[in-house]
Image (spheres, rainbow, N blue to C red):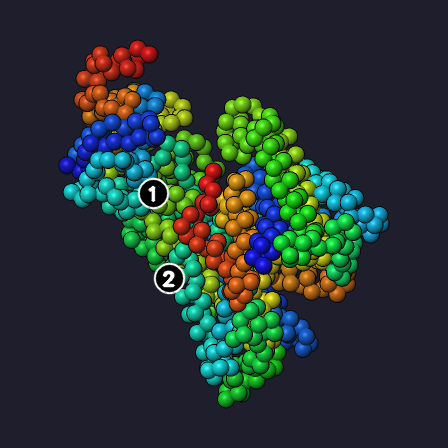
């Protein structure tokens, strides 16, 4: 067991956003969390990544109780995230962004004497990651000047560059064209061979395509858990999604 | 805060140009020119210290004159009251600046943008107010009788402005190489990234606050060196040196030069100081010119003179 | 004795309030810290000085100096601030820093570097007796002006429609947008009003402190501290911050003169350590 969320509760004022949520993720497993808008997906995501603290409940990662760890600490343990809204370094090129993220994989971020440009391991790694995420042709392009779809790919690239065990993906296909969506699905499928992944999405097709196990969230509570087939066949889920 | 393009090549070229000009001017110049060059060099060191944290970490400090003052006053006290040699005093002020910078940095690096500016401003003013009332520091009279390093044993007379200028230029070069090294190293690149998007650095496991505190304390130490050299150049210190407008003028310099390139800060310090000095000799409304010129640059030349140079460089290719 | 100190502190607080309220509204509405706010205070005092010298009437100066300062504010808004609203916050701060230079030099060129004084109108120039102690009537007048402004602002903001719009724009820009409040117009008027109040502070203080170049800097730092302590963007914060800083400073100067200069900064440092968003978080 890699990650477990036990009885997570979260309220904003009088509104209960997460109600006794339990989630378990195994190593090298790709999990999907879906639910209609306002179901609490984003809150749940933030609770896992450490951007938001739950009111009650515990989180364990790799047998460590990370309930009170902030984002930075969780990231250092191997929980990496990509954001729904691109969170890049606008003035840095693709290569610069990736080498930068790699300083955290190699634990050299405090180094003040060796030029990053001359670090062989990091530069080779950066080029390999760029290849993996399909940005080999854009190494010297500034993030700000990339097309939106490519920026989404770089968003993923930065997340994997710091060598995570668990990847948290918040709506990785948000705002993408169907063509771009296809590309990113291909990419995530490739990544799922090596990483444990949790995807939060409201596009069901994307989740069906990628996730081995799916949690369905509705108004803060988990209402269903199963593989894509059983989710597709579940009347309850169909009702929640289509019935409104 | 936007910084100029990361361009180590142009950075070095610009340094070499400025360096050759200052060496030639120093050799062939008059007594006054040499003094002026030393002054500009010291201001450049101060501007670099501001440039470093503005571009690495996105911290705009309106209180850095405090560290100028810490360097100046500790040099004065160490050499007058304790008889420590001027060179050792300068080295000690660096350490004093770094330590005080680290303590202050620890408490303020979590502040964002505007709040950081206002808090540094208030801290600087607090120091300024304290200096003015402290009898130990000479109050509003300041302290005089500070001597320059003595290298007469190896046949160098530091009271000659020619040699003293070269001396401060050496300091500038040392600091330049230290900071470019850090800028290019992982820590510097992380600090650059923090300026652009600190949120993401946290998300990939960076020690955001620690990086910023290190940068701030280093910058404080460098500003202290500038203060130390400044009192050795003039032989006295006046508390006006610690007023917040001195920090403001430093910011003007780095914006005129272009933030984030280090040599741009030197260029900015040179240009602004020459304009201030020469213009005030010719016209008595030079502050209007500075004010309007500054606003023009902030509005229309985001990369300052560095941006101009980069365009020239592209055309030459 | 304590009453006199109390009144002195109150007068100082009211002057700070006139300055802080403008700065904080502008910050709340535009997220801009206007470092040139002190310059407007100085310009207000100088304009008042000229009016006073030509007409020999303090009352005309009192009325027209704030109005003219507000006009300068409106001019600055249209020419500059309006265009930098969405710019990087550092850029905004630095632009206003450039304005300080322009303000200082304009004043120097137009009025010279000497310090001037304005005498309080004869009706207010004699001290009044407060429980056997003579107290300058003019200071009471300044307190009255401050309270008048305080209450009219309160009335405008709480009881009128335009006030509600301003409050919405300051406190909750998103709702303001939803309600389709024309923010540009509101910005224009509040910016001018804020500048006008700075001018009012300048002219009312002139008979007490005189008029000289450099008066802008002293007051700017104090005003910034008030705003930071009170909580930027908060009107109640501006009042509480002004009272706190005004009283701490005035009483500090009497009881612990050695530390008086430093004590207000200490207050700010403590506030920031324990309440980083200021006393009145919006």
Quadrant of residue B264 within the rendered picture: bottom right
Residue at screen point 22% across, 43% down: A66
Relative horizontal placement of residue A165, taking residue C78 as reference (left or right): left
Where is residue C258? Give x, y as percent.
53, 67
Question: What's the distance in space between the residues labelled 1 and 2, CA to CA?
Answer: 25 Å
Neighbours of disc 2 within 10 Å: few (<14), some (14-19), many (20+) = some
Neighbours of disc 1 within 10 Å: few (<14), some (14-19), many (20+) = many
Where is residue B64? Give x, y as percent.
52, 61
Residue at screen point 19% across, 39% down: A60
Chain at tag 1: B
Residue A113 - label: 2
Residue at screen point 75% across, 53% down: C125
Residue A71 visible in the current orientation: yes
Relative horizontal placement of residue C73, taking residue A229 as reference (left or right): right
Residue at screen point 35% across, 45% down: B202
| Residue hosting label 1 | B203
């Amino acid at each position: 067991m890699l990650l477990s969320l036990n009885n997570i509760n979260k309220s904003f004022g009088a509104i209960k956003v997460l109600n006794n949520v339990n989630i378990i993720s195994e190593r090298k497993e790709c999990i999907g969390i879906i639910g209609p808008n306002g179901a609490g997906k984003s809150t749940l995501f933030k609770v896992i990544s450490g951007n938001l603290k739950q009111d009650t409940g515990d989180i364990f990662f790799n047998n460590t109780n990370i309930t009170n760890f902030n984002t930075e600490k969780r990231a250092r343990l191997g929980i990496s995230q990509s954001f729904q809204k691109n969170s890049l370094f606008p003035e840095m090129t693709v290569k610069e962004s990736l080498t930068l993220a790699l300083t955290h994989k190699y634990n050299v971020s405090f180094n003040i004497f060796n030029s990053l440009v001359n670090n062989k391991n990091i530069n080779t790694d950066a080029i390999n990651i760029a290849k993996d995420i399909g940005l080999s042709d854009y190494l010297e392009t500034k993030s700000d000047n990339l097309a939106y779809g490519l920026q989404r790919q770089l968003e993923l690239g930065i997340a994997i560059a710091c060598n995570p065990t668990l990847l948290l993906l918040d709506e990785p296909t948000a705002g993408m064209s169907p063509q771009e969506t296809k590309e990113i699905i291909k990419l995530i499928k490739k990544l799922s061979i090596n990483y444990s992944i949790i995807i939060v999405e409201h596009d069901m097709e994307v989740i069906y395509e990628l996730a081995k196990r799916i949690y369905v969230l509705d108004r803060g509570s988990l209402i269903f858990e199963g593989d894509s087939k059983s989710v597709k066949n579940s009347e309850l889920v169909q009702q929640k999604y289509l019935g409104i | 805060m936007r910084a100029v393009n990361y361009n180590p090549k142009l950075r070095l070229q610009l340094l070499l140009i400025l360096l050759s000009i200052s060496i030639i001017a120093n050799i062939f110049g008059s007594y006054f020119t040499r003094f002026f060059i030393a002054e500009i060099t010291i201001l450049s060191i101060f501007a670099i210290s501001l440039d470093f944290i503005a571009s690495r970490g996105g911290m705009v400090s309106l209180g850095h004159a405090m560290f100028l003052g810490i360097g100046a006053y500790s040099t004065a006290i160490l050499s007058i009251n304790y008889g420590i040699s001027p060179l050792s005093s300068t080295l000690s002020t660096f350490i004093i600046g770094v330590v005080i910078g680290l303590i202050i940095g620890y408490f303020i690096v979590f502040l964002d943008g505007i709040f950081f500016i206002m808090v540094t401003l208030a801290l600087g003013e607090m120091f300024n107010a304290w200096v003015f009332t402290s009898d130990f520091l000479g109050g509003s009279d300041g302290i005089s009788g500070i001597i320059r390093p003595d290298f007469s044993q190896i046949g160098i007379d530091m009271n000659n402005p020619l040699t003293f200028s070269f001396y401060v230029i050496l300091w500038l070069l040392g600091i330049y190489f230290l900071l470019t090294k850090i800028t290019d190293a992982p820590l510097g690149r992380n600090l650059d990234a923090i300026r652009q998007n600190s949120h993401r650095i946290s998300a990939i496991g960076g020690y955001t606050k620690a990086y910023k505190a290190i940068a701030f304390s280093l910058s404080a130490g460098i500003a202290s060196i500038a203060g130390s050299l400044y009192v050795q150049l003039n032989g006295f210190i006046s508390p006006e040196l610690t007023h917040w407008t001195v920090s403001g003028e430093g910011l003007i310099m780095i914006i005129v030069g272009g933030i984030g390139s280090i040599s741009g800060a030197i260029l900015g310090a040179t240009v602004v100081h020459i304009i201030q000095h020469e213009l005030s000799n010719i016209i008595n409304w030079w502050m209007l010119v500075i004010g309007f010129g500054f606003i023009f640059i902030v509005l229309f030349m985001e990369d300052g003179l560095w941006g101009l140079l980069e365009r020239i460089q592209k055309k030459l290719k | 004795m304590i009453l006199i100190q109390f009144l002195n502190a109150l007068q100082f607080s009211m002057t700070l309030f006139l300055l802080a309220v403008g700065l904080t509204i502008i910050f709340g509405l535009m997220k801009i810290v206007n470092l040139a706010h002190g310059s407007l205070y100085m310009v207000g005092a100088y304009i008042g000085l000229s009016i006073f010298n030509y007409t020999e009437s303090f009352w005309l100066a009192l009325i027209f100096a704030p109005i003219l300062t507000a006009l300068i504010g409106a001019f600055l808004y249209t020419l500059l601030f309006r265009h930098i609203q969405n710019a990087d916050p550092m850029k905004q701060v630095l632009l206003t820093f450039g304005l300080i230079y322009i303000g200082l030099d304009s004043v120097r060129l137009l009025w010279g570097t000497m310090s001037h004084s304005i005498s309080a109108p004869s009706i207010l120039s004699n001290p009044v007796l407060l429980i056997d102690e003579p107290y300058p009537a003019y200071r009471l007048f300044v307190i009255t002006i401050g309270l008048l402004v305080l209450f009219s602002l309160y009335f405008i903001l709480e009881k009128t429609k335009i006030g509600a719009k301003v409050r919405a724009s300051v406190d909750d820009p998103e709702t303001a947008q939803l309600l389709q409040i024309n923010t540009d117009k509101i910005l224009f008027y509040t910016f001018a009003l804020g500048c006008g109040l700075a001018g009012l502070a300048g002219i009312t203080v002139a008979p007490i402190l005189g008029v000289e170049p450099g008066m802008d800097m002293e007051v700017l730092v104090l005003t910034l501290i008030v705003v930071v302590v009170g909580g930027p963007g908060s009107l109640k914060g501006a009042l509480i911050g002004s009272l706190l800083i005004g009283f701490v400073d005035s009483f500090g100067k009497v009881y612990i003169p050695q530390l008086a200069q430093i004590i207000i900064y200490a207050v700010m440092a403590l506030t920031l350590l324990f309440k980083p968003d200021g006393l009145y978080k919006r």
